[in-house]
Image (cartoon, rainbow, N blue to C red):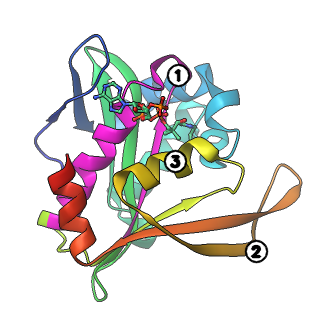
Amino acid sequence: MLDEPIPLTTGYPEPVVLHKLSTADADLFAHHVAADLDHLGEHLPWPELAKTPDGARDWLAKYYRREDGRLVVGGAFAGDELLGGALLLQYDERYATVELGVWIVSQAEGKGVATAACRALIELAHGELRAERIEWQVAPENVRSRRLAEKLGFQFEGRLRSTYEYRGRRHDTEVLSLVGDEIAQAVARG
Ligand SMILES: CC(C)(COP(=O)(O)OP(=O)(O)OC[C@H]1O[C@@H](n2cnc3c(N)ncnc32)[C@H](O)[C@@H]1OP(=O)(O)O)[C@@H](O)C(=O)NCCC(=O)NCCS
């Protein structure tokens, strides 16, 4: 999946291309995460794990091994600079369900890079996985993420209470989804 790079249409001043990330990118990835940890880790637990080269390698290796339904991490590059990316995880082939995640460094926010990276992975989920349900999980305080999901066409489903612990306290998770024909419609909207 994502074996060929995908050019993204964005408002970023340079061309942006989505490349599959592998453990060979661990040093670059760790630097990228560590340089913007306060922003990336505000609502997400994984940046704390991936902020060192060893941590990044472990984190990326789980995608290589497809551990627990992890499928692919796409990195959005402007030249050699990693701006952020999107990922597919929690894939269940039997039920054709998958989860979509995304992150963008603060200096590249608001330019449509996250939107375009998500659309590219929604298209792959539609075309290659024949996904019938794409899920978006978000912390209730993460207004920017929820707004992005809704712009992509995701529908709000509800709030799961006390799903995980992060930074010493329990957090809820909001769930949105694209199902059935909504997935093709989200692809067409791009
Ligand atoms: C959540 C997150 C990914 C949102 O990223 P973003 O940069 O706001 O998303 P985008 O730029 O793609 O889209 C939003 C804006 O870009 C604009 N945009 C979309 N396509 C565009 C284009 N082609 N050209 C110019 N602007 C565009 C949209 O109009 C929107 O503007 P607005 O914010 O003024 O309404 C980002 O804030 C982030 O990484 N946060 C930290 C990690 C995180 O929480 N991830 C989500 C986990 S659930």
Which contiguous range is marked in magenta?
A: 98-126
Of labels 2 and 1, earlier in sequence is: 1
Residue 189: image location, x then y, percent: 20, 51
Q: Which mark is residue 161?
A: 2
* Horizontal relation, residue 84 to residue 173: left or right: left
**Judging from the image, what secondary structure is the residue with disc 3 in?**
helix
In the rendered image, which residue does mark 3 sit on? Answer: 147
Q: Amino acid at mark 3?
A: Arg
**Can you tell which quarter of the image residue 12 is in?**
top left
Quarter in which the C terminus is drawn: top left
Q: Which mark is residue 19?
A: none
Q: How many tags in the picture?
A: 3
Q: Are marks 1 and 3 in contact (CB under 8 Å)?
A: no
Q: Amino acid at mark 2?
A: Arg
Residue 38: image location, x then y, percent: 70, 28
Q: Nearer the viewer, residue 80 or 12?
A: 12
Whether disc 3's CB lies below 8 Å from ligand 1 is answered: yes
Image region (quadrant) for ligand 1: top left
Q: Residue at x 57, y 41 (%)?
A: 144
Of labels 1 and 3, earlier in sequence is: 1
**Judging from the image, what secondary structure is the residue with disc 1 in?**
helix
Image depth: mark 1 or mark 3 in front:
3
In the rendered image, which residue does mark 1 sit on? Answer: 31
Relative height, residue 167 to residue 70 (above, below): above
